[in-house]
């Protein structure tokens, strides 16, 4: 396919998959349980953090996290006591364990009490080109309080070669206003044009078949390739094509 054919094909797939039905089988359903901005932000961030592996298990464990936060994530994060943290037991998702979860609650408390919240931390380091520096600086803030070194693996850094799939997915959720009721469009301080595609096995494989990526690894260099090409397809909203690439890979075996 040439450029125009690829664009037409992917635009059609965006319309197909950027639809409320997408929510039913996707982890984005977790933050959709809430209406308050801060609840959505925190539920989305914690869900995106454990978004690897089988989607059914991601959804199950993200729901368990919300239950452990009494289904009021913002109130729990901001007002929890040491006693509240000690009462949380028996949580694990693959390599993300109870100690990781408790630290994330503490770090989020620090961010909302001392840094004006998640949107503020990301937005103040956004450039006109991409989110790379914003994610890098976010990780610094996230781990500015005492922590075990092993926990840092749960927040990716694109300046260290990572495609940062989960954070980029989270930013898509928060920033894009798709008018379809899937992505939230809560953060007006960041433009959709600077977002990066959440590059994973499925979207990467489809992108290679379409000639949007040449690099074999799903790393920061491959993401730069993909972003460059997606911005040619739609400079204002390149990440909408995540729906097309992911849908083609997961639901159609493209």
Image: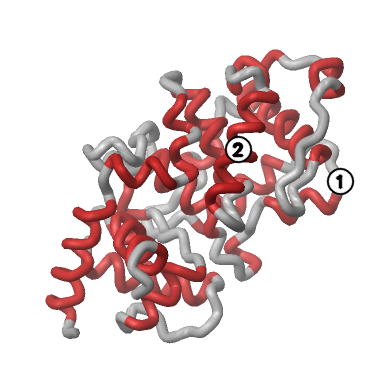
Q: Decide: few, some or many residues near mark 2? Use Cα within 10 Å; few <14, some 14-19, many ≥20.
A: many
Q: Residue at x 66, y 48 (%)?
A: 139
Q: Is residue 79 left or right of residue 54?
A: right
Comparing 11 with 196, the one in front is 11
Residue placed under numbered mark 1 in the picture: 148
Nearer to us of marks 1 and 2 is 2
Q: Position of residue 82 (x, y in %)?
A: 85, 19
Residue 185: image x %, image y %? 33, 36
Looking at the image, can residue 160 be seen? Answer: yes
Q: Where 161 sits versus 195, above or below?
A: below
Question: Going from the N terminus, do you reach mark 1 or mark 2 first?
Answer: 2
> Where 77 sits versus 59, above or below?
above
**For the residues marked 1 and 2, what is the alpha-carbon distance in whole angstroms?**
22 Å
Between 43 and 21, the residue placed more toward the observer is 21
User: Which residue lies at the image location 39% right of the left edge and 54% below the top edge?
Assistant: 195
Q: Is residue 250 above or below residue 81?
A: below
Task: Kindly state the secondary structure of the residue where label 1 is placed.
Answer: loop
Residue 103 appears in the picture as rendered = no
Secondary structure type for disc 2: helix
Colour scheme in use: secondary structure
In-image side of 137 versus 132 (left or right): right
Q: Residue at x 56, y 31 (%)?
A: 42
For label 2, the residue is 62
User: Which image quadrant is residue 53 in?
Assistant: bottom right
Coordinates of residue 254 in the picture (x, y in percent): 34, 75
In this rendering, is residue 15 above or below 202?
above
Callout count: 2
Quarter of image, res 173: top left
| Crowdedness near tag 1: few (<14), some (14–19) or many (≥20) residues, C-alpha within 10 Å | few
- Residue at point 65%, 67% (across, down): 160
Q: Nearer the viewer, residue 11 or 130?
A: 11
């Amino acid at each position: 396919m040439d450029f125009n054919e690829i664009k037409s094909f992917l635009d059609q797939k965006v319309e197909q998959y950027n639809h409320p039905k997408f929510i039913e089988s996707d982890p984005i359903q977790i933050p959709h349980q809430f209406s308050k901005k801060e609840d959505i932000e925190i539920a989305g961030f914690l869900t995106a953090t454990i978004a690897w592996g089988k989607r059914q298990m991601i959804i199950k464990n993200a729901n368990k996290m919300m239950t452990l936060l009494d289904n009021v994530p913002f109130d729990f994060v901001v007002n929890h006591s040491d006693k509240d943290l000690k009462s949380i037991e028996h949580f694990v998702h693959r390599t993300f364990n109870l100690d990781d979860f408790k630290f994330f609650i503490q770090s989020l408390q620090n961010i909302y009490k001392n840094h004006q919240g998640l949107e503020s931390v990301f937005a103040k380091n956004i450039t006109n080109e991409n989110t790379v520096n914003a994610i890098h600086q976010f990780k610094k803030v996230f781990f500015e309080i005492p922590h075990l070194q092993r926990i840092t693996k749960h927040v990716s850094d694109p300046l260290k070669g990572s495609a940062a799939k989960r954070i980029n997915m989270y930013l898509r959720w928060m920033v894009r206003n798709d008018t379809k009721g899937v992505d939230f469009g809560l953060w007006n301080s960041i433009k959709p044009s600077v977002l990066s595609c959440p590059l994973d096995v499925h979207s990467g494989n489809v992108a290679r078949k379409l000639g949007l990526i040449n690099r074999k690894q799903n790393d920061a260099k491959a993401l730069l390739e993909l972003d460059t090409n997606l911005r040619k397809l739609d400079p204002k909203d390149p990440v909408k094509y995540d729906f097309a690439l992911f849908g083609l890979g997961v639901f159609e075996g493209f």
